[in-house]
Amino acid sequence: MPIETLRLLADPLRAQILGLLARESLCTCHLIEETGASQTNVSNHLRLLREAGLVSSEPCGRYTYYRLRPERLRELADTLSDVADAAVANSETKRPCP
């Protein structure tokens, strides 16, 4: 999960979408307006974010609103924190050369 999720978040538009959803729930039309991306592009990115469990969707009349799932981001942050802790704990460890 962490490597795939990091790759997913490395895309500038997906990162921008997450930043926007961190502030409020938005529908696709809002995200198109805010990012300047095409509807198809935004929808494809939202699909990937939904499949990764980073956003959830909620139908509201003719529109679908998207919301960030902070618990998934916290899991990723915890994983990265564990890696950083291991790096600190092993900062003096060196594998000998043959």
Image (cartoon, rainbow, N blue to C red):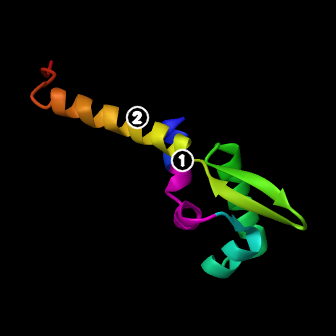
Where does label 2 land, which residue? 79
Query: In this rendering, is residue 95 above or below 15?
Result: above
Direction right: furthest residue? 62
Q: Label 2, label 1: how many angstroms apart (C-alpha)?
A: 14 Å
At label 1, which amino acid type do we have? Pro
Asked if the stretch drawn in magenta spans residue 32, the answer is no
> Badge 2: few (under 14), some or many (20 or more) residues near its Cα, within 10 Å?
some
Query: The residue tagged with tag 1: helix, strand or loop?
Result: helix
Residue 45 lies, in percent from the top left, at 68, 60
* Type of amino acid at the residue the image marks with label 2: Thr
The residues colored magenta run 7-24
Using residue 61 as the reference point, say whether residue 90 is left or right of it. Answer: left
Quarter of the image for the C terminus: give it: top left
Q: Does residue 56 appear left or right of residue 81 in this picture?
A: right
Q: Nearer the viewer, mark 2 or mark 1?
A: 1
Q: Circle 1 sits on which residue?
A: 70
Residue at image location 70% in from the left, 59% down from the top = 66
Q: Quadrant of residue 43?
A: bottom right
Q: Which residue is most to the left?
A: 92
Magenta-colored stretch includes residue 9: yes
- Within 10 Å of disc 1 (Cα), the crowding (few <14, some 14-19, many 20+) is few
In percent of the image, x 74 and y 68: which residue is there?
A: 27
**Which quarter of the image is occupied by the N terminus?**
top right
Q: Main secondary structure of the magenta part?
A: helix
Mark 1 or mark 2, which is nearer the start of the sequence?
1
| Lateral position of residue 50 relative to residue 7, left or right | right
